[in-house]
Each structure stands twice: as C-alpha cells, then as structure tokens.
Image: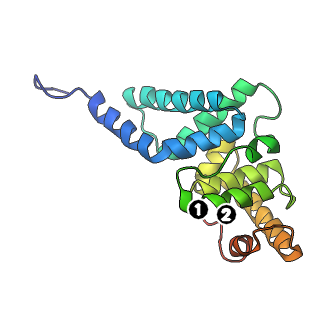
C-alpha cells in the first residue's frame, strides 16, 4: 500500500479500535476475570493480556469476528492458566460469590448481584453459573460457547437447565429477592 508522507500509520486505526473496545468491554471483562481468579491482581493481568493479544493479532492483520467473545476467551484461558488447577472449563463457585456484579451499572447492581449469589442455593452447577454470569454480561450463545470451549447448543442446554432450576427455586421460595427472581424465571429468555 502506498502511503503518503505525513499520513497516520496503519496502527492508528487499530489503536482507536482498541480504545473504543476497551471503553465498552473492560468493566465486564474485569468483573468476569475477577470472578474466575478470585484475585484482583490476576484479573487486571488478564485484562491487560487480553487487550495486548488483541492488539498483536489486529496489528498482524488478523480479522476477529466477535471481539467481545474473543477477549473473554483470552481472559478466561489466561486466568485458568494462572490457577493451574481443576478442569479447564470449571470454576469454583466460591470465586463467583466474592465479586460484585455487575459493577459500573448501579441501577442493576443489587438485584443481579443478589441473584448471582443465590444461584448456588438454587442448585446450579458451576458451569451453569458461569453461563448465567456470561449472559448477564450480554454475551450471545456463540460468544459464551467460544469463551468456555463448548458448542452453542450446549450453552443453550445449560442455560435452559439453569432457567428451570431458577424457576423451581422461585416456586419453592428459596431466593430472598423473589420479585426479581420471578422476573428472570418467568420473563427473561436466554436467546442469543
């Protein structure tokens, strides 16, 4: 490509792309990495690593179809590599309960955080909780599948099973924020 002197380097567009992406996704990515790591230092490292790798890939000319899903996958793998324990796709429930969710959205913070903390009492498995957590960060089925290394159909099945458990728990009065839990169980569909 012939570039005239004084025109911005190719990386200028990529840098702006990353700045825009960071502004949109950094909060959600940091919350997710913090939930996985149960350690804010590792979460910040995962955030930095994800955006650094994104920059390297884009600078090398690679096209990334779903930047959000790609970043979550890199952060997910980074944290699991750091932990070096357990199954590649499983997360300790305790780590999910220690991170407020979602930060930076105060209007929704209390009910969603409360519901996520109640998922264990509702009988959800760690993988179901992780799928629900990723859905609360507005990832589509395909993006969740990419993050967790699953098929989109498996994600749908896990979310359907989680939905059923939430509905059952609401019917039994297990969850203390019954109105919100009923809205999730009865109204929100986990469609991508």
Work out which quarter of the rendered image holds the C terminus and state it: bottom right
**Does dot 1 land on a helix, a strand or a loop?**
helix
Residue 133 position within the rendered picture, expressed as x and y whole percent measured from the top left: 68, 52
At horizontal 52% and vertical 29% (from top left) the residue drawn is 48
**Does dot 2 land on a helix, a strand or a loop?**
helix
In this figure, which residue is indicated by the disc labeled 1?
A: 108
At horizontal 65% and vertical 72% (from top left) the residue drawn is 188
Answer yes or no: do the residues labelled 2 and 1 have beta carbons within 8 Å? yes
Residue 181 position within the rendered picture, expressed as x and y whole percent measured from the top left: 73, 70
Quarter of the view holding residue 39: top right
Q: Is residue 183 above or below residue 102?
A: below
Q: In this view, does 20 lie to the left or right of 41?
A: left
Q: Which mark is residue 33?
A: none
Q: Residues within 10 Å of mark 2 (few under 14, many from 20)?
A: some
Q: Which of 29 and 141 is in front in this view?
A: 29
Q: How crowded is mark 1: few (under 14 residues within 10 Å), some or many (20 or more)?
A: few
Q: In this view, does 175 lie to the left or right of 69?
A: right
In this figure, which residue is indicated by the disc labeled 2?
A: 111
Residue 145 position within the rendered picture, expressed as x and y whole percent measured from the top left: 65, 49
At horizontal 70% and vertical 47% (from top left) the residue drawn is 150
Q: In this view, does 52 lie to the left or right of 140?
A: left
The number of numbered discs placed on residues in the rendered structure image is 2
Residue 104 position within the rendered picture, expressed as x and y whole percent measured from the top left: 52, 51
Query: Distance between the Cα atoms at labels 2 and 1?
Result: 6 Å
Q: Is residue 43 above or below residue 99?
A: above
- Asked whether the viewer can see residue 90, the reply is no
- Asked whether the viewer can see residue 14, the reply is yes
């Amino acid at each position: 490509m012939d570039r005239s002197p004084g025109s911005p380097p190719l990386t200028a567009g990529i840098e702006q792309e990353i700045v825009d992406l960071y502004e949109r996704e950094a909060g959600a990515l940091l919350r997710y990495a913090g939930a996985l790591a149960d350690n804010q230092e590792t979460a910040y490292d995962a955030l930095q690593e994800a955006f650094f790798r994104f920059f390297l890939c884009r600078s090398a000319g690679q096209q990334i179809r779903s930047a959000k899903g790609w970043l979550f996958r890199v952060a997910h793998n980074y944290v699991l590599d750091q932990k070096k324990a357990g199954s590649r796709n499983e997360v300790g429930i305790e780590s999910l309960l220690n991170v407020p969710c979602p930060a930076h959205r105060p209007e929704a913070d209390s009910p969603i955080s409360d519901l996520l903390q109640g998922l264990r009492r509702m009988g959800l498995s760690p993988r179901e909780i992780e799928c629900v957590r990723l859905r609360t960060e507005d990832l589509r089925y395909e993006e969740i599948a990419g993050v967790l290394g699953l098929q989109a159909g498996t994600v749908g099945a896990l979310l359907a099973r989680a939905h059923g458990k939430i509905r059952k728990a609401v019917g039994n009065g297990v969850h203390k924020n019954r109105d919100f839990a009923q809205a999730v169980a009865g109204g929100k569909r986990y469609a991508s």
